[in-house]
Image: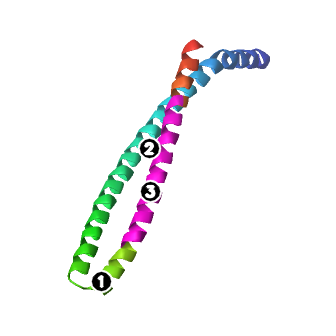
Amino acid sequence: MRRLFAVFAVLALAVSAPRILSAQDSSDVKQDRKEVRQDRRELRGDRKDIRHDTRDIRQDRRDVRHDLKNGDTTDARRDARDLRQDRRDRRHDVRDARRDRRDLRRDRKDIHQDQKKDSTK
């Protein structure tokens, strides 16, 4: 009796294994989509921050010009130093955003290819 039960258990497992694995594959695709969606939100926020930084840099330039016009060279030097650092930081942020966009496109392409493979099974 125990042998018969063991045989049925192994047979049931063998029959249900492909269904279980295919269900896990589809949940992985859904999870990947959620991750991509979250990455897109973060990227949008990063690009928004870059726009704000650009506005701040323009305002700093105006401040430097205004300080030089008024003859306040000490403030102008300090503002110019801050301006250089802000421009450098913004440039790095832009590079990072581009890199993130490229990675996101690759991820979306990979998910699309995985879905094609799943549909052919």
Q: Which mark is residue 75?
A: 1
Of residues 42 and 95, the one nearer the viewer is 95
For label 3, the SS is helix
Of residues 61 and 3, the one nearer the viewer is 61
| Residue at screen point 24% across, 85% down | 71
Name the spot of residue 77 as percent of width and height, x first: 35, 81
Which numbered disc, 1 or 3, marks the residue closer to the eye?
1
**Residue labelled with disc 2:** 39
Give the magenta range. 83-109
Mark 2 is surrounded, within 10 Å at the Cα level, by few (under 14), some (14 to 19) or many (20 or more) other residues, namely some
Which numbered disc, 1 or 2, marks the residue closer to the eye?
1
Q: Whole-Å distance between the Cαs marked 1 and 3?
A: 26 Å
Q: Which mark is residue 106?
A: none
Q: Is residue 40 above or below residue 64?
A: above
Q: Whole-Å distance between the Cαs marked 3 and 2?
A: 16 Å
Mark 1 is surrounded, within 10 Å at the Cα level, by few (under 14), some (14 to 19) or many (20 or more) other residues, namely some
The kind of residue tagged 2 is Asp
Mark found first going from the N terminus, 3 or 2: 2
Name the spot of residue 121 as percent of width and height, x first: 60, 13
Of residues 116 and 44, the one nearer the viewer is 44
- Mark 1 and mark 3 in contact? Answer it, CB < 8 Å: no
**Residue labelled with disc 3:** 93
The kind of residue tagged 3 is Asp
| Residue at screen point 57% across, 26% down | 25
Name the spot of residue 3 as percent of width and height, x first: 79, 17
